[in-house]
Amino acid sequence: MANATCPPGNSLPVFNGLPIPANITTAFTPRNNDSEPAMIACCSPNPVNVAADCYVWCEVPPRLQNGSQVEIQGAFSNCLHLNSPENSTQIRIVGAHVAMAARAIPTTRELGLWALLSVGGWVLALGM
């Protein structure tokens, strides 16, 4: 990589340490060129972004989102390999993050609202 402050290109940081949204399924790899043809092809129709000046990432398109995190990571890695120049034998490390599922546990605010509505309903029912 061109930036000397970036870690070695054969390792990935913990996803939570990167400034990448956690509410979408993403793939990321050590690079800092957001116009790399293989990355553009695999991310399309989504844009390629740069995080922390050391990693390119994008929202994984639906065609590559089938399966677990490991399967998505493998599909994205395979896409990068297939879209790289034919003479490229370079293996690229790829990370993937699956969007966090919708929250099933209500927040304190939501519980408070339900409690207020329940008490209000009882007051109205008993007051009649």
Image: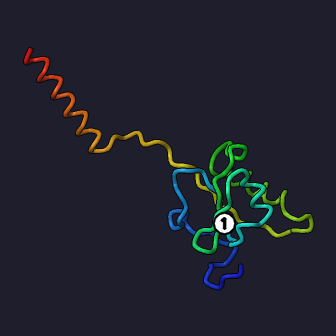
Q: Position of residue 111 (x, y in %)?
A: 26, 38
Residue at 52% x, 55% y is: 22
Residue at 53% x, 57% y is: 21
Residue at 34% x, 40% y is: 106
Disc 1 packing (10 Å; few <14; some 14–19; many ≥20): many
For residue 66, above or below residue 122: below
Direction bottom: furthest residue: 4
Residue at 84% x, 58% y is: 83
According to the image, label 1 marks what residue? 56
Q: Is residue 4 left or right of residue 108?
A: right
Instruction: Name the kind of residue labelled 1 in the image.
Output: Val
Frontmost residue, 18 versus 94 = 18
Which quadrant of the view contains residue 39? bottom right
Frontmost residue, 34 versus 17 = 34
For residue 63, above or below residue 13: above
**Circle 1 — which element?**
strand
Q: Position of residue 73 (x, y in %)?
A: 68, 54
For residue 7, above or below residue 125: below
